[in-house]
């Protein structure tokens, strides 16, 4: 059969389906609401967008089809889909299979006409791995009328009505010294204090001037003392500056109305905008492992406001749009609050420019099961949404709450930053706008999604309380610490240990805030394979330098990217920058670099037994590499412990640490503990005749954080140090 006869047959089937559709369902669409239309599932599809029978669709909408299962690409061709506007007629366009192999997207060559009804008919012939041939289907939707074009654009900072200017407790004990590079005079002043062991990494912020929210922002990456590691002034407001697992940075640029992605050298490498004619919202972006991205948009529409404003038949309400973009930036999933929520779901009568902002989505997260967790600030609700079908799976909080709260008599209110933890719990920043007295807190709930219970297992409030009327974030780290961004108030950031003690605090001056605050290890760390030559060392001997062979563990960097002057052993011992070899030392056909470390500088890091040493360095990409390997240290059995040496006799990781010091046991010894960066942790006099111990506590009485420490004897000539690992 020729291609022409195939097209004629397909066209004939399409015409038959279209006529039947118009007679059976299409005519009813003019008089019946969306609830009268069949769902995707009733039509035999996993997901369809726009939803069958939906209204308020923008003229630039794409059609998205997910029949269920992997689609046979050979079955996708001309004549499969017919899209016809009641005014604009048939629409040509681009029908393509997304990179997920499951989703079809159709982009019309021309926009639809405002107010028209659009019918879509899928002909027989589409095939998947779960269905040999997908049944034909027909559905329709209605494009929003021309009145939407008369609505004023929404402001970028959509929480402007919630900002009170900020006030609260500020406890600042020290101000960082001036950074080595002069800062712009308009760079916001920062005060910071460190009281204990923080989680690894640097702090990420983007400044907002509360009284002038459209003023340009500074993107900044800060050390714990507030010193900028990186800063950049933007031409407009910036939001949500953060790092992603793939090593990219993103931030929302209010002037461009998009998210920009930066590499480790801070160059723009990508941008992300909503599709289908929607303006991108700046509250959140999620970059997925498959290269897709989740975004939000706020959708102002003229709707019937009688349910919330009696006597006012028509007015503006703001809906929420969630989109998933594939690697080619096609919209492969779209979720609209108009199809799932009611404007009466709002709590507190929140508005923007007089419009009812009934949802106000302000965070997205992807659950381990692949579904979406949405924070609906103005509904006091957390919603879980199926990323496959768009169905609501559960609702936590607000008027439609499905859960029983345990151990928490205080409902969360106008929350931000709802995120799933690795242990399955939810953390969020509870702004508390609708309770008296006003206060904000960070909370953690253990969810039972079967029994529908939410048990409060942790919360943190400052003493005295502070109230952040807008913004805010909570971030949990692997060491158990929690970073809290308090939003539109001061202090800006507080990091607390699991026992509730404050380990660090950083703040802008009152009147300056950050939408969110994060901590990430930065620059990004790329894994390396390391081996030492020689791999065994006699503790009492003298010898030449120790060589380290460094090789990329994957494709993230090459040996040529390694900047030799930056290479360090255990963060302190410099490699000999004048003596290195770039070759293939281990003969595995992967280029590597061999560097040398002076033996006299390495010896203090070694103790008898197996020693794990770390090699790090910077890369030309702006990232860093890190790798570890073992070195065995032995000593002749006849060799006595030298007077200036110490060794650890307690089991690895045990507290207190038992220390054996060389020399006569009849006299007291001066012992000291240093961290891996050479900073004194504790110094004390060990009593003669009694085994020396260290209980893991610093000189100031605080617990030493998890990590590697060096113990030395300091009452005579310098000797080798013993290494201690503390695990918390």
Image (cartoon, rainbow, N blue to C red):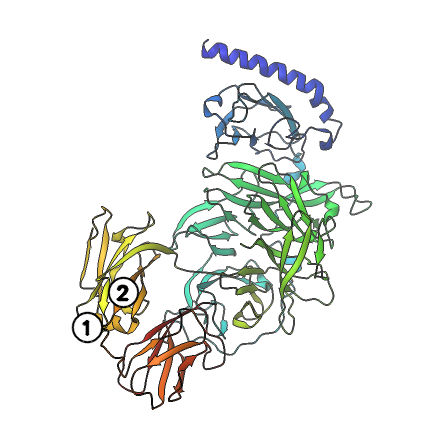
Residue 563, percent across and down?
A: 27, 59
Q: How many marks?
A: 2
Q: Residue at x 44, y 71 (%)?
A: 654
Q: Depth check: give the residue in front, 646 or 640.
A: 640
User: As rendered, which of 448 and 100 lies closer to the eye?
Assistant: 448
- Would residue 91 be visible to someone looking at this image? yes
Q: Is residue 588 left or right of residue 178?
A: left
Q: Dot 1: few (<14), some (14–19), or many (≥20) neighbours within 10 Å?
A: few
Choose top left, top right, bottom left or bottom right for residue 684.
Answer: bottom left
Residue bearing mark 2? 632
Query: How would you rate the neighbour count of disc 2 (Cα within 10 Å): few for under 14, some for 14-19, many for 20 or more?
Result: some
Q: CA distance from mark 1 to mark 2?
A: 14 Å
Question: Does 124 sit left or right of 682 as displayed?
Answer: right
Q: Do the residues bearing badges 1 and 2 touch, measured as CB atoms within 8 Å?
A: no
Label drawn at residue 583? none
Q: Which mark is residue 541?
A: 1
Which element is circle 2 on?
A: strand
Instruction: Give whichever of discs 1 and 2 has the lower sequence position.
Output: 1
Which of 154/350 is in front? 350
Where is residue 420 shown, x and y percent of the image? Answer: 57, 53
**Front residue of this view, candidates 255 and 623:** 623
Residue 187 x, y percent position in the rendering: 47, 67
The single residue placed furthest to the front in the displayed view is 638
Q: Is residue 359 above or below residue 519?
A: above
């Amino acid at each position: 059969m020729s291609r022409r006869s195939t097209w004629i047959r397909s066209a004939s089937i399409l015409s038959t389906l279209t006529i039947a559709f118009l007679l059976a369902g299409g005519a009813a669409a003019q008089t019946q609401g969306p609830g009268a239309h069949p769902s995707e599932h009733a039509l035999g599809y996993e997901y369809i967008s726009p939803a069958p029978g939906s209204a308020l669709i923008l003229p630039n909408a794409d059609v998205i089809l997910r029949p269920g299962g992997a689609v046979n690409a050979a079955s996708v061709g001309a004549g499969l889909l017919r899209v016809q506007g009641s005014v604009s007629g048939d629409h040509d366009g681009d029908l393509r299979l997304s990179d997920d192999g499951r989703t079809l997207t159709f982009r019309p060559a021309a926009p639809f006409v405002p107010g028209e009804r659009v019918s879509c008919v899928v002909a027989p012939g589409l095939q998947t791995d779960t269905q040999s041939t997908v049944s034909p289907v027909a559905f329709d939707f209605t494009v929003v009328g021309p009145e939407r074009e008369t609505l004023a654009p929404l402001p970028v900072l959509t929480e402007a009505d919630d900002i009170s200017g900020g006030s609260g407790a500020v406890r600042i004990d020290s101000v960082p010294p001036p950074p080595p590079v002069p800062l712009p005079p308009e760079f916001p002043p920062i005060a910071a204090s460190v009281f204990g062991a923080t989680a690894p990494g640097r702090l990420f912020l983007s400044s907002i001037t509360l009284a002038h929210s459209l003023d340009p922002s500074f993107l900044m990456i800060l050390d714990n003392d507030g010193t900028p590691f990186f800063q950049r002034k933007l031409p407009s407001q910036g939001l949500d500056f953060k790092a992603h697992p793939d090593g990219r940075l993103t931030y929302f640029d209010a002037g461009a109305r998009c998210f920009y992605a930066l590499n480790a050298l801070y160059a723009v490498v990508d941008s992300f905008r909503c599709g289908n004619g929607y303006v991108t919202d700046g509250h959140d972006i999620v970059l997925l492992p498959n290269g897709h991205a989740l975004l939000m948009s706020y959708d102002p529409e003229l709707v019937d406001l009688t349910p919330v404003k009696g006597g006012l038949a028509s007015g503006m309400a703001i809906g929420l749009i969630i989109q998933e973009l594939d690697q080619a930036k096609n919209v492969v999933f779209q979720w609209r609050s108009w199809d799932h929520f009611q404007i009466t779901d709002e709590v507190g009568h929140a508005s923007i420019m007089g419009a009812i902002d009934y949802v106000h989505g302000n965070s997205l997260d992807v659950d381990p099961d692949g579904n979406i967790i949405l924070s609906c600030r103005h509904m006091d609700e957390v919603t879980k949404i199926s990323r496959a079908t768009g169905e609501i799976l559960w609702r936590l909080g607000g008027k439609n709450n499905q859960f029983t709260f345990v151990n928490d008599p205080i409902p969360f209110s106008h929350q931000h930053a709802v995120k799933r933890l690795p242990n399955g719990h939810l953390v969020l920043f509870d702004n508390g706008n609708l309770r008296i007295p006003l206060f904000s807190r960070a909370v953690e709930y253990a969810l039972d999604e079967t029994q529908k219970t939410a048990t409060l297992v942790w919360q943190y409030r400052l003493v005295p309380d502070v109230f952040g009327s807008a913004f805010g974030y909570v971030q949990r780290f692997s060491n158990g610490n929690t970073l809290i961004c308090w939003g539109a108030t001061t202090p800006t950031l507080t990091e607390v240990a699991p026992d509730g003690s404050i380990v660090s605090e950083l703040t802008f001056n009152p009147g300056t805030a950050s939408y969110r605050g994060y901590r990430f290890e930065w620059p990004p760390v790329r894994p390396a394979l390391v081996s030492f030559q020689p791999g065994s060392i006699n503790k009492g001997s003298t010898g030449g330098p120790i060589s380290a062979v460094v090789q990329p563990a994957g494709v993230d960097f090459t040996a040529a990217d390694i900047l030799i002057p930056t290479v360090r052993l255990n963060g302190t011992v410099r490699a000999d920058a004048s003596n290195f070899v770039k070759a293939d030392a281990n003969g595995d056909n992967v280029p590597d670099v061999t560097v040398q470390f002076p033996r006299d500088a390495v010896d203090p890091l070694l103790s008898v037994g197996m020693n794990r040493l770390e090699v790090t360095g910077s890369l030309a990409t702006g990232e860093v590499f890190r790798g570890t390997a073992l070195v065995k240290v032995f000593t002749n059995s006849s060799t006595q412990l030298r007077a200036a040496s110490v060794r650890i006799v307690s089991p690895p990781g045990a507290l207190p640490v038992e220390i054996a010091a060389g020399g006569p046991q009849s006299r007291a010894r001066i012992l000291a503990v240093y961290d891996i960066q050479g900073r004194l942790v504790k110094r004390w006099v060990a009593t003669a005749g009694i085994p020396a111990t260290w209980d893991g506590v610093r000189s100031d009485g605080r617990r030493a954080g998890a990590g590697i420490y060096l113990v030395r004897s300091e009452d005579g000539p310098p000797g080798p140090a013993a290494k201690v690992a503390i695990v918390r």
